[in-house]
């Protein structure tokens, strides 16, 4: 319907080259009156629609796992005082690898805010990616040993401004709508030894769904497995039942995937993701790891 309504019937006079497409878009939006504005061809309308399809497919793969983890946090745990130990998300520095000390309510807020920030980053990843390319092409650089090999040390002002905008939006949302003060540091590492350039920044955050999507799959699969086979039902019952098994996995992830651990961990913006990487590297030693294998887990692609 869109192509019939807005597209010209013939595409032959425009062609399929990228330069012709860009020129058509530019000419249709700059310095022309409504009467003289150049029309889109059917092929161009088709490309616009497909680009929107790509965007929504990207959102399905990148933002949805973060949104689902936020829903699991709210569904399986209370923001106030925990009912018992299995609902308690409190952590203490020096215990079980934690580098932060939070009571339950503080840590619940810390995890919720971190996931909310990741959700907003995923929703605006297209723009961040474009800005990262601009910074990589336009900014000067020097090769330096950052402790993680030889890297291009390069400023990323465009990505930095956008990240500050996203962070301030999330902080305002937390204060105004959720009535929560911001927990942890607000430092965004860019152009330093931790995140030497914009490409490294993009690489870090494209790994968020690669960490969370397998976890979401496992939590979703457990009820199906529990009802499918009597032997598996008896095995999962050793963990206290299906819901208790789900809560056990989520509790450990929410506690120690956000405990400030890792080489450059902590409560800063990037340190939260470092903690998750650190947790992923230890998952095979967890008591509940056989449940991962039952659900077909083969590793984190991140």
Image: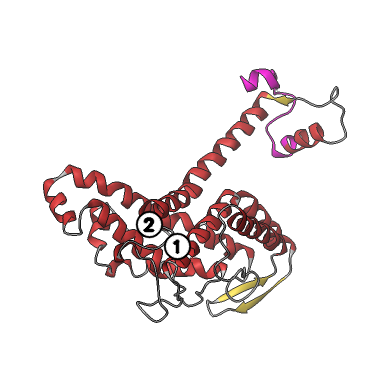
Vertically, is 132 above or below 274?
Answer: above
What residue is disc 2 on? 77
Q: Secondary structure at mark 2?
A: loop
In percent of width and height, residue 162 lies at 68, 57
Q: Which residues are magenta?
A: 1-21
The residue at the point 70 percent across, 22 percent down is 6
Asked if disc 2 and disc 1 are in contact, CB closer than 8 Å, the reply is: yes
Image quadrant where one finds the C terminus: bottom left
In percent of width and height, residue 97 lies at 38, 77
In percent of width and height, residue 10 lies at 70, 19
Asked where in the image residue 143 lies, by quadrant, the reply is bottom right
Asked where in the image residue 195 lies, by quadrant, the reply is bottom right
Q: Residues within 10 Å of mark 2 (few under 14, many from 20)?
A: many
Image quadrant where one finds the N terminus: top right
The residue at the point 60 percent across, 76 percent down is 193
Q: Residues within 10 Å of mark 1 (few under 14, many from 20)?
A: many
Instruction: Tell me, for residue 108, which label it has, or none.
Output: 1
In this rendering, position of residue 249 left or right of residue 212: left
255 falls in the magenta region: no
């Amino acid at each position: 319907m869109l192509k019939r309504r807005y597209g010209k019937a013939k595409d032959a006079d425009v062609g399929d080259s990228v330069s012709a497409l860009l020129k058509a878009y530019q000419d249709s939006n700059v310095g022309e009156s409504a009467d003289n504005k150049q029309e889109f061809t059917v092929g161009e309308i088709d490309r616009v629609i497909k680009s929107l399809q790509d965007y929504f497919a990207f959102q399905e793969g990148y933002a949805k796992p973060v949104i689902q983890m936020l829903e699991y946090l709210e569904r399986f745990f209370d923001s106030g005082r925990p009912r018992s130990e299995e609902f308690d998300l409190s952590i203490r520095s020096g215990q079980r690898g934690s580098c932060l000390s939070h009571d339950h309510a503080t840590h619940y807020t810390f995890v919720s805010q971190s996931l909310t920030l990741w959700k907003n980053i995923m929703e605006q990843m297209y723009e961040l990616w474009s800005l990262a390319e601009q910074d990589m092409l336009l900014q000067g650089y020097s090769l330096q040993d950052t402790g993680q090999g030889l890297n291009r040390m390069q400023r990323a002002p465009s990505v930095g401004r956008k990240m500050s905008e996203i962070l301030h939006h999330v902080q305002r949302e937390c204060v105004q709508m959720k009535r929560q003060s911001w927990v942890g540091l607000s430092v965004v590492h860019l152009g330093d030894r931790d995140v030497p350039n914009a490409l490294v920044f993009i690489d870090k955050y494209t790994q968020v769904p690669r960490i969370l999507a397998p976890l979401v799959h496992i939590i979703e699969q457990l009820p199906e497995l529990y009802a499918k086979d009597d032997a598996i039902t008896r095995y999962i019952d050793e963990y206290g039942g299906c819901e208790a098994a789900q809560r056990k996995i989520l509790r450990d992830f929410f506690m120690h995937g956000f405990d400030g651990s890792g080489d450059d961990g902590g409560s800063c913006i990037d340190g939260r993701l470092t903690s998750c990487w650190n947790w992923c590297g230890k998952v095979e030693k967890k008591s509940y790891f056989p449940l991962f294998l039952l659900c077909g887990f083969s590793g984190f692609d991140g």
